[in-house]
């Protein structure tokens, strides 16, 4: 059993400049002070530093990777969509959606992020190591085959899975615990019976023309892929117990039934209790338990093959701590880094009813 994690990182991820405004939107003419866009390089700087200096530093091996090529990106994405992104002038930027900024020079960074995920996946699939983590930025799980959404341009995990398929991989599972529904990954594999897409998220519903998927439990996949999409929309305010119970009672049984050859984790930390972009209350301890459970499923079902890819996480200090504790759990360690600010008590009185409702909604959809 491995006691090390390969970390794939490239400092070019800092070069994606999302600018300032009114949180994620354009600047307000009514406010003197514009704030940094939540998806900014500083959050990744803290993640890098806590891994290099924190208690698990000695258990990590750092690697670089080449950017993904267009031939790899178009395994998941429509070629016309990739061509449009590549054609944006390098000295210009734009808002691809109301909240998603393509800054000057962002395209090489987007390809770098996908390359990190591809390299991490190949590291594990080739047997070079059992566990890898890609510190990718910008995130990817909202990017659909032909659409930008939610800070995401290229679906890093989707591209990595398609690359591995060309190397003989048959069945993959994605477990996404970013606080937002992983609609892009769902969309890309919705009719595919060989990729189980699982998303555990706050129950925010659809949010417009770039995110028409609701993330509801009745979105189960279609055609040959019916049953291969699992959504777990948790009530706002769900904390550690809700997330671990949902994992144990809903996610793990589905993954065991699917029996993947490799497990991918869309590892966002924006379900934390201090995140400005989420309304959940998961603590560092909760993320440690999620990491431990992910490792357990990979060991049980996939020969230990586990790939984590960075997604959201916008509380610049606390998200970095939550990443560290996630990897503590992956390493089957108890608490190595104390929680400096966590305090939120849990409210679990409606948890059993919520889990029962999710399971019934999915069962009714599968029977329909």
Image (tube, rainbow, N blue to C red):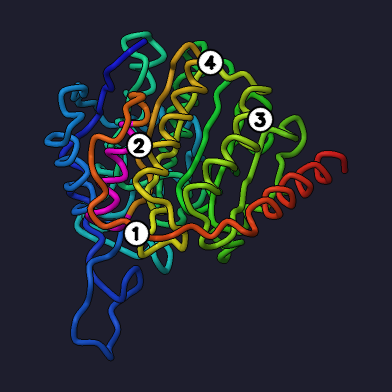
- Is disc 2 in contact with disc 1, using a CB cutoff of under 8 Å? no
Q: Nearer the viewer, mark 2 or mark 1?
A: 1
Q: CA distance from mark 4 to mark 3?
A: 13 Å
Q: Is residue 231 left or right of residue 317?
A: right
- Residue under circle 2? 326
- Is disc 1 in contact with disc 4, using a CB cutoff of under 8 Å? no
Q: Residue at position x 37%, y 15% from top?
A: 130
Q: Nearer the viewer, mark 3 or mark 2?
A: 2
Question: Could one spot residue 253 in this view of the protein?
Answer: yes
- Residue under circle 1? 343
Q: Is residue 227 left or right of residue 186?
A: right
Q: Main secondary structure of the magenta part?
A: helix
Mark 2 or mark 1, earlier in chain: 2
Instruction: Look at the numbered disc 2 and give the secondary structure of its residue.
Output: helix
**Tag on residue 164?**
none
- Residue under circle 4? 300
Q: CA distance from mark 1 to mark 3?
A: 32 Å
| Residue 221 image offset from top left, x and y in percent | 71, 39
- Per the rendered image, the range of residues in magenta is 314-328
Nearest the camera: 149 or 305? 305
Residue 190, picture quadrant:
top right
């Amino acid at each position: 059993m491995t006691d090390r994690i390969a970390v794939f990182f490239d400092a070019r991820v800092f070069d994606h400049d999302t600018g300032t405004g009114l949180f994620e939107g354009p600047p307000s003419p009514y406010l003197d002070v514009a704030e940094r866009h939540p998806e900014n390089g500083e959050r990744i700087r803290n993640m890098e530093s806590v891994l290099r200096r924190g208690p698990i530093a000695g258990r990590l091996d750092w690697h670089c990777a080449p950017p993904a090529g267009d031939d790899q990106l178009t395994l998941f994405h429509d070629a016309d969509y990739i061509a449009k992104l590549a054609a944006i002038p390098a000295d210009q930027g734009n808002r691809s959606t109301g909240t998603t900024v393509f800054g000057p020079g962002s395209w090489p960074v987007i390809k770098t992020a996908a390359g990190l995920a591809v390299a991490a996946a190949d590291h594990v699939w080739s047997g070079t190591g059992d566990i890898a983590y890609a510190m990718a930025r910008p995130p990817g799980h909202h990017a659909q085959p032909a659409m930008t959404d939610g800070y995401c341009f290229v679906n890093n995990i989707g591209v990595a899975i398609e690359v591995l398929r060309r190397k003989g991989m048959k069945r993959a599972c994605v477990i996404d615990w970013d606080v937002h529904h992983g609609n892009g990954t769902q969309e890309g594999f919705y009719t595919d019976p060989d990729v189980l897409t699982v998303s555990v998220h706050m129950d925010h519903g659809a949010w417009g023309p770039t995110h028409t998927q609701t993330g509801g439990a009745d979105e189960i996949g279609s055609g040959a892929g019916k049953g291969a999409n699992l959504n777990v929309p948790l009530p706002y305010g769900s904390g550690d117990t809700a997330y671990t119970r949902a994992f144990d009672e809903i996610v793990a049984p589905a993954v065991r039934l699917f029996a993947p050859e490799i497990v991918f984790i869309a590892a966002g930390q924006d379900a934390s209790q201090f995140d400005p972009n989420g309304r959940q209350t998961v603590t560092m301890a909760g993320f440690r338990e999620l990491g431990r459970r992910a490792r357990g499923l990979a060991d049980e079902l996939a020969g230990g093959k586990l790939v984590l890819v960075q997604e959201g996480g916008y509380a610049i200090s606390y998200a970095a701590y939550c990443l560290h504790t996630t990897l503590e759990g992956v390493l089957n360690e108890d608490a190595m880094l104390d929680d400096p600010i966590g305090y939120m008590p849990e409210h679990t009185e409606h948890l059993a009813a919520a889990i029962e409702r999710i399971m019934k909604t999915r069962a009714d959809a599968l029977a329909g």
